[in-house]
Image: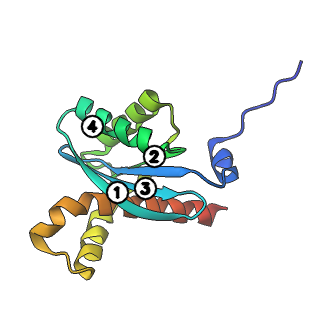
Amino acid sequence: MRTARPQPRRSALRARASGTVLAFEFGTRRVGVAVGELGLGIAHPLETINAVSDRERLDEVGRLIREWEPALLVVGLPSHMDRTEHALSTRCRRFAAQLERAFGIDTRLVDERLTSAAAAESLAASGVRGRRQKGLLDQVAAAHILQTFFTARDDAA
């Protein structure tokens, strides 16, 4: 009896035309969260999780997963401009692996270089400057990470 071979992850994602995606901009104190839809390919800032322990972070992510029922999770992977590892790269990979294990949802890592700067620029262009940016910066950075994912996916199709 012949068994079908599983399709590569990328092909399965390309075949999926719709579904919610949650994206995370990981930080040791705050995690920015954004949401988007595979069919539309547009990211929106959602919220900022304030948590200091892994357990608190996972509990908050679990709440969002129950609410949004995502088909995919995306986690920003920091690196330096020369593509060398950032101090937080290992923690972000571990966070992504925790999410995939805990919730059984396919989780992708996406290059997040310059997303915080782009988020600050976007907020400033909207009239949000200085201290007013602090509560929004991480979730807007997560939206930039998710938009990067959507753009790369569309370019690869």
The circle drawn on residue 46 is 1
- Residue at 60% x, 66% y is 155
Q: Are marks 1 and 2 in contact (CB under 8 Å)?
A: no
Q: Secondary structure at mark 3?
A: strand
Rounded to the nearest whole Å, what is the CA distance between mark 1 and mark 2?
Answer: 11 Å
Label 2: which secondary element: helix
Q: Residues within 10 Å of mark 3 (few under 14, many from 20)?
A: many
**How far apart are the alpha carbons under marks 2 and 4?**
16 Å
Are discs 2 and 3 less than 8 Å apart at CB?
A: yes
Residue 108 appears anywhere in the view? no
Say if mark 1 contacts mark 3, CB within 8 Å.
Answer: yes
Residue topped by disc 2: 68
Q: Nearer the viewer, residue 84 or 59?
A: 59
Question: Which residue matches tag 4?
Answer: 57
**Mark 3: amino acid:** Val
- Give the distance between the C-alpha atoms of the residues marked 3 and 4, in whole angstroms: 17 Å
How far apart are the two marked residues, 2 and 3, measured between alpha carbons?
9 Å
Considering only order in the chain, which callout, 1 or 4, is on the residue closer to the N terminus?
A: 1
**Which three-letter amino acid code belongs to the residue tagged 2?**
Trp
Q: Residue at x 45, y 31 (%)?
A: 103
> What's the mark number on residue 35?
3
Mark nearer the N terminus (1 vs 3): 3
